[in-house]
Amino acid sequence: MYSNYLRIPSKKIYMAIEKDNGIAQTNNVTRICANTKIIGNIVTQHDIRIDGYLEGQIKTDGKLVIGESGKCTGQAECKNVDISGAFDGVLKVSELASLKDKCVFTGELHSDQLSIEPSVRISGQLISPELSKKDDKKPMPGTGTIHPAHQEPEPKR
């Protein structure tokens, strides 16, 4: 897949060059720095790091990182998340959600894999999508049908 490597002598950085089109492959991270405020939506395939403030929607195929000074309000969908700052809204994570030291989480967290450090503050709901799917298939108690063999016989008239 990769045929060449490019070496930049002054910084000793190696970047793989994709064989087919010669585009340099780097670790692309979208950063929202401290003292930056964004109101809007972000859609990307790459990782996102928020050290500032974002209000809106985020959708990424990568990892979402909210640093200690970061705050995110709204909705987010990602593969993995590390939160050391604040999140308020609905967060859907397809793999691991890590709530780190000093994290303040308010809202709904949808994830089947969860790591929570002791100092984390949470107010809201933790929802397991996998368990929700299983629960949807089971009838609620008292709402299912009764097999005829288990029914009480009707009184004779």
Image (cartoon, rainbow, N blue to C red):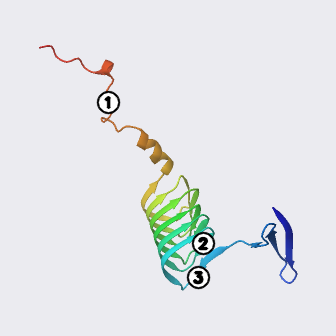
Where does residue 125 sit, x and y in percent of width and height? 42, 58
**Does dot 2 land on a helix, a strand or a loop?**
strand
Residue at mark 3: 33
Image-quadrant location for residue 78: bottom right
Determine whether 131 is above or below 83 in the image. Answer: above
Determine whether 15 is above or below 157 in the image. Answer: below
Residue at mark 1: 145
Q: Which of the marked residues, 1 or 2, is nearer the chain's N terminus?
A: 2
Tell me if residue 24 can be seen.
yes
Q: Which of the marked residues, 2 or 3, is nearer the chain's N terminus?
A: 3
Residue type, mark 3 in image: Cys
Label for residue 102? Answer: none
Residue type, mark 2 in image: Ile
Tag 1–tag 2 contact (CB < 8 Å)? no
Residue at mark 2: 48
Residue type, mark 1 in image: Thr
* Mark 2–mark 3 distance (CA, rounded to whole Å): 11 Å
Residue at (60, 63) in percent of width and height: 61
